[in-house]
Image (tube, helix red, strand yellow):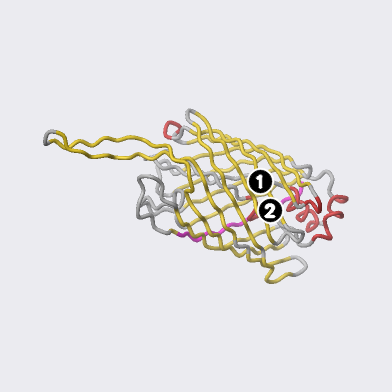
Amino acid sequence: MKKLCLKFLLLFSVIASYAQEKQNESNEVDVITEEDEILDSLFNDETIEDLFKLSENLDFLHFSINYNNKTYFSGRDIGIDQFSITPQINYIHSKGYFAGISGVYYNELEPKWDYTSITVGYGKRFGKNKQFRWSTYYDRYFFSEPSNNPLKNAINFSLELDNKSRTLGTELATSLLFGSESSIQIVSSSYGEISLTKGKKNELKFRPELRLIVAQQTIQLAQTFTFRDRVFTVYKQNNEFGLLNAQFLLPLQYSYAGFDFEAGYILNLPSALEGESNLKTTGTFMFSVAYLLGL
C-alpha cells in the first residue's frame, strides 16, 4: 500500500522549490523547479487506473534536504568557494493541491541563511494516458537582507509532457518575479530515465536531464573614455533577456520504501550576455535525501 501511495504521489504531485541565489553586484535571481527529479515518475502505465481508484483523497508530507559542494549564480563563478544546503518540507494532497516551505544556507555569505520561501499551488494531469500535466503556484520570499533583493514574489506556470512509460519527458516553466522590480524567467527541461536495478521495495535509476534557462538579467557596464587629457569611467545598467545557462544533470537515484537518495554531478555551460566574456564551464557535486510520509 505504501508503494501504491508513493506511485500515486509521483503521478499527481507538483512541488515547486526554487534555487534562488543572491549576487550583490546585480541582485540576480535564479528560479529553477526541482520537483521532477524527486517526484514525477511512474514505473509502468498499467498502474494508472488502479491508482485513481485507490487514492482519491490522500495527503502526504515530503521532507528533503539537498547539498551542493559548490555554489554558482546562473552557472557563473563569482570567486566565492562555498557550499549550499537546502532543506524543504512539502504538503501534498492527492487532488493536486500542495504547499511547502524551504530555505537556503550558504556557508560563506553573511548572513549565512539567505532566505525562506513559502509555496502554494495546484497541479493536475490530463489527456490520453495522463501524459500531460499543468501546474500553477505562487512563491513568497523572506530574505535575511531584504534591501538587497527587490524580487520577493513569483507567479509560476508549467506544462509537462511525458511518454506512456514515463521514461522520457519535457517541461516548460515560466516565472514572473516581482517586488520593487520585476523580471521573467523561462526554464525548459528534458529528461530521460533508465532503470538499472529494481526490486520489490527498491529501485536504482539513472535520470539525466538538460535544462535551458532563459531570463532577464541586470548587468552593470563600464565605459572608459578620455576627455581633455582626463580619464573618465561611466557606469550604466542594461536589462538583458536571453539564454543565461545550460545545465546537464547526471544523477543516480535510489529509492527504498519511503526514502529517496540522489547523488550526481551538475555541469553548467553559462552563456555570455552583453558585457560578459570568458565565462568558464562550472560544475558541482550534489547529494539529497528525501522521505515521504503518508498522513
Question: Is residue 280 found left or right of 285 in the rendered image?
Answer: left
| Above/below status of 207 relative to 74 | below
Q: Is residue 286 magenta?
A: yes
Q: Looking at the rendering, which quadrant does residue 149 occupy?
A: top left
Q: Which residues fall within the magenta stretch? A: 283-295
| Above/below status of 255 relative to 108 | below
Question: Is residue 172 found left or right of 78 in the rendered image?
Answer: right
Residue 273: give x, y in percent of width and height: 41, 47
Residue 26: give x, y in percent of width and height: 40, 39
Task: Tell me the quarter of the image containing the N terminus.
Answer: bottom right
Asked whether the residues under the numbered discs 2 and 1 touch, taking CB atoms below 8 Å apart as contact, a structural biologist would say yes
Residue type indicated by callout 1: Ile
| Above/below status of 44 relative to 187 | below
What residue do we see at 58% from left, 57% from top?
288
Residue 65: give x, y in percent of width and height: 58, 52
Q: Which residue is denoted by mark 1 in the rendering? A: 15
What residue do we see at 70% from left, 41% from top?
98
Residue 45: give x, y in percent of width and height: 80, 60
Instruction: Please tell me whether mark 2 sits on a helix, a strand or a loop.
Output: loop
Residue 40 bears which disc, if any? none
| Above/below status of 1 relative to 56 | below
Q: Is residue 277 magenta?
A: no
Count every numbered label the image shows and give the total: 2
Q: Which residue is denoted by mark 2 in the rendering? A: 39
Q: Earlier in the sequence, mark 2 or mark 1?
A: 1
Quote the CA–CA distance across marks 2 and 1.
8 Å
Foreground: 172 or 20?
Answer: 172
Residue type indicated by callout 2: Leu
> Badge 2: how crowded within 10 Å, few (<14), some, or many (20+)?
many
Instruction: Please tell me whether mark 1 sits on a helix, a strand or a loop.
Output: loop
Question: Is residue 10 found left or right of 270 in the rendered image?
Answer: right
